[in-house]
Amino acid sequence: MRLSSLAVCLGLGGLQGCLAVTTARVVPVTALMPPARQSEPREPEFAVSIERFIDERRNPAVFGYGGLSVSGQAPITADGDLSAAVEGYVAEALARKGVLRGASPLALRGRVQRAEVGALVTTRNYQADAAFELTILDPRSRARLWARGYAGSGRANDARTALAMAFGEALNALEADDSMLALRSAFLAAGGQVPAAPAAAAAPARRSDIDVVDSRAASRPDDYAFIAGIERYQSVPEAQFAERDAALFRQYAVKRLGVPEENVVSLLGAQATRGGLARYVEEWLPKNVSGRSRLWVYYSGHGAPDPVKGGAYLVPWDGDPAFLESSAYPVARLYERLAALKAKEIIVVLDACFSGAGGRSVLAQGARPLVTVRESAIPHDPRFSVLAAAAGDQITGALQDQGHGMFTYYLLKGLKGAARQDQDAHMTMSELAAYLEAEVPRAARRQNREQTPQVHAGDPALRLY
């Protein structure tokens, strides 16, 4: 405030005079403050906030093998909401990573996918498997910016400890996973702006002509089907359309091949772990399949070759091509276990390849593709048939316009009736084999590559329906 003088003349009772008074000119308070220092621009900070965590299992209140009658099964009841418990542990892990904040434009969702525990009759221990998935969403479009699944297993003398160990292993995988850093880098590079969501996979241009199963076969009450399909893996590239193929094969197994719905086990995505494959192939099937049964085994997903020994492996959801012996399932072991069953007929369908050169095949980082794969010995057993998508040095392909893997597309189209060579209502193994051996190579050549199905028909005259 600056003071100034002003002469004011007063007349009071004849007393006259002039007084010198001072007046004040009001100035803004900010003018009295020292000049403000220019604030440094704040560095953008990457953070997420947990929006929702759900338990997507069919029966969230019970841990067990999904209600299946497994000998030695020990279901246990949850003390509380499992999703809330897992959310708490995930929040602690993210806080330790320094990415969890109460308010953030990046919303994280979680899903508990598996919580299974059962008794191992041979060792009197309990085996548990657990899996959950985390997803970060674009706040504007709700598109997925990042997603990862985490799985674990545990074995202990009691069921609860085994399950706790399984979730502990899955949480340890989250602690060790740095894949979120790629999203963090994109966020910081954009100056703290939410990066553009990755383009969604293009939907099939039209509905496939095999997607509708137009007839229902007579039920075969003794038959069984075990189906596994993995499209999005925990740590390896996607196997395009694999889960869609497996889900549709299930429909054909029930409606076209006569397998009762209750006799079908289908493991998709994170359900199809190495432990899951082993449990159903090595424990569930022997307890259920009888000498009157026809068994269908269908797998769609990645295969992998062992670069040293030349063996072929199925790659489960949690598989790692660098550690095949401990994380993948050997094709030779699959054949051996299936051949030991009491089944009347066994039909194995493999929509995978084992060259390591692409398609539905993966290889450890740094290894050379086109590994020479030693053919897994198919049992010399007239009960046993194998339909495989490609030769050992080839890759599998997909039909983008149909939204299916090429081999599964022609397999199901053949079963739908295209493979029949006469006018009767039945189809034999030889008719289906001839159709696959003609149509798949022809379609592959249109894509300027080679793909030759490998068919071993234990009984060519076997009537499929």
Image: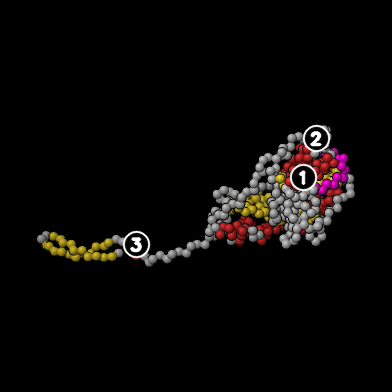
The foreground one among 72 and 41 is 41
Return the residue at label 2: 218
Closer to the chain start, of discs 3 and 2, is 3
**Left or right: residue 380 compared with residue 14:** right
Q: Main secondary structure of the magenta part?
A: loop
Q: Amino acid at mark 3?
A: Val
Q: Classify 10 Å Cα crowding around label 2: few (below 14), some (14-19), many (20 and above).
A: some
Q: Position of residue 195 (x, y in %)?
A: 57, 54
How far across and down, in percent of the image, does residue 305 sit? 78, 56
Number of numbered discs:
3
* Three-letter residue code for mark 2: Ala
Q: CA distance from mark 3 to mark 1?
A: 86 Å
Number of residues whose C-alpha sits closer than 10 Å to that of mark 1, classed few (under 14), some (14–19) or many (20 or more): some
Q: Residue furthest left?
A: 14
Quadrant where the C terminus sits is: top right
Label pair 3/2, CB-CB below 8 angstroms: no
Front label number (1 vs 2): 1
User: x, y (%) of residue 303?
Assistant: 76, 53
Residue, disc 1: 442
Closer to the chain start, of discs 1 and 2, is 2
- Other-residue count near label 3 (Cα within 10 Å), few / some / many at <14 / 14–19 / ≥20: few
Q: Which residue is mark 3?
A: 29
- Report the front residue among 26 and 288: 26
Structural distance between the alpha carbons of marks 1 and 2: 33 Å
Give me the residue at 79% from left, 35% from top: 217
> Is 375 drawn above or below residue 414 in the view shown?
below
Residue 318 visible in this rendered orientation of the protein: yes
Residue 281 counted in the magenta span: no
Answer left or right for 456 relative to 47.
Answer: right
What SS does tag 1 mark? helix
The boundaries of the magenta stretch are 453-465
Amino acid type indicated by mark 1: Arg
